[in-house]
Amino acid sequence: MPLYGFQPPAGTPYGLEVTTLEDFHARHDDWPWNPPRPGRATFHYMILVTEGEMRHDVDHVTRTVAPGQWLWVRPGQAQCWHEPGTARGPFILFEPDVLRPDTAGLLSSLTAHDAPAVLTPHPDDAPWLQQTALQLLDEHRAMGHRPLAVHHALRRSLLEALLLRLVQTPDVSSKRVAAAVRRDTYDRFLDVLQLHFRELHQAKEYSQLLGCSVRTLSRAVQDATGKGVREVVNERRVLEARRLLANAQWTPQAVAAHLGFTDAANFGRFFRQHVGLTPAAYAARDTTAD
């Protein structure tokens, strides 16, 4: 799948281009929808549909964007254009580093890959967002009317104001709340893990302690670590085993019993699978080789 870099018209400064969907269609004739050509972009692009209806593929799913809704395609996402329809509206393209770092941090839930591709603003925000997008378009077209640094500062300020308002979209806000809940679940899981990793080894056992479903716990751990619950539990058991085996007073048999293994042989297989050495070999190794 081809990767498209940011290529605005000549003379467009600072990684930000603002146009309209209708101008984009006119400028590119039949590219890239005849035939459809899937690709990925290195930049963000957003379209506010003010008239008509638009269809666009994001990560292999066809999205339908109605008037008042925004389409947002993030860098690296698979995208594919459909033939132009009746849709009209502002079209904003920008590279990630256009946003100031502090603003980018506030927008992390909106710029993330799993954020919604189609955003439906709250009715109270929709007119303001449309007006700001049109002001951004006017400022972009006014290049040369004021010093370039001032021109770009105005464009960036308008873009950031628009995005900071858009991050309050109910679709995104609900995901932010869900993410906060998952983070809280993961933090509580770590607390109980420290207390019970010796005797509890299954996701179901931890979910019961936390009062949540296995699915909720699994998703919270996956979001925080990229790993499954069982993998995190096993990593904690391996860490404890390594700590104890480094002490000559602990034999492999004693460590196996301490960590809840039915016998030393099971512990030996478990430890070797994760560390690459038998418990005895690990305990006997030269400490400088660790």
Image (cartoon, helix red, strand yellow):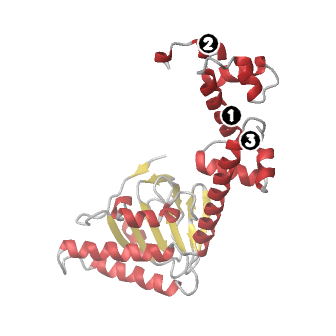
Numbered disc in front, either 2 or 3: 3
The type of residue carrying mark 2 is: Ala
- Label 2 vs label 1, nearer the camera: 2
The numbered mark, 1 or 3, whose residue comes first in the sequence reads 3
Among the 4 quarters of the image, the one containing residue 275: top right
Residue annotated with mark 1: 234
Q: Earlier in the sequence, mark 2 or mark 3?
A: 3
Residue sitting at 47 percent across and 81 percent down?
129
Q: Nearer the viewer, residue 126 or 205?
A: 205
In this rendering, which labeled residue sits more in front, label 1 or label 3?
3
Give the quadrant of residue 96.
bottom left
Left or right: 64 as drawn, with respect to 108: right
Residue 106, given in percent of the width and then of the height, sits at 46, 67
In the rendered structure, which amino acid carries the disc numbered 1? Asn
Rendered location of residue 56, percent (x, y): 55, 64
Residue designated by label 3: 196
Asked if the residue at tag 3 contacts the one at tag 2, i.e. Cβ–Cβ closer than 8 Å, the answer is no
* In the foreground, 283 or 266: 283
Q: For the point 78% across and 39% down, which residue is it?
A: 200
Can residue 55 be seen?
no
Q: Secondary structure at mark 1?
A: helix
| 258 to 44, vertically: above or below | above
> Mark 2 = which residue?
281
Residue 166 in view of the camera: yes
Which residue shows up at 76% across the image and 44% down it? 203
Q: Amino acid at mark 3?
A: His
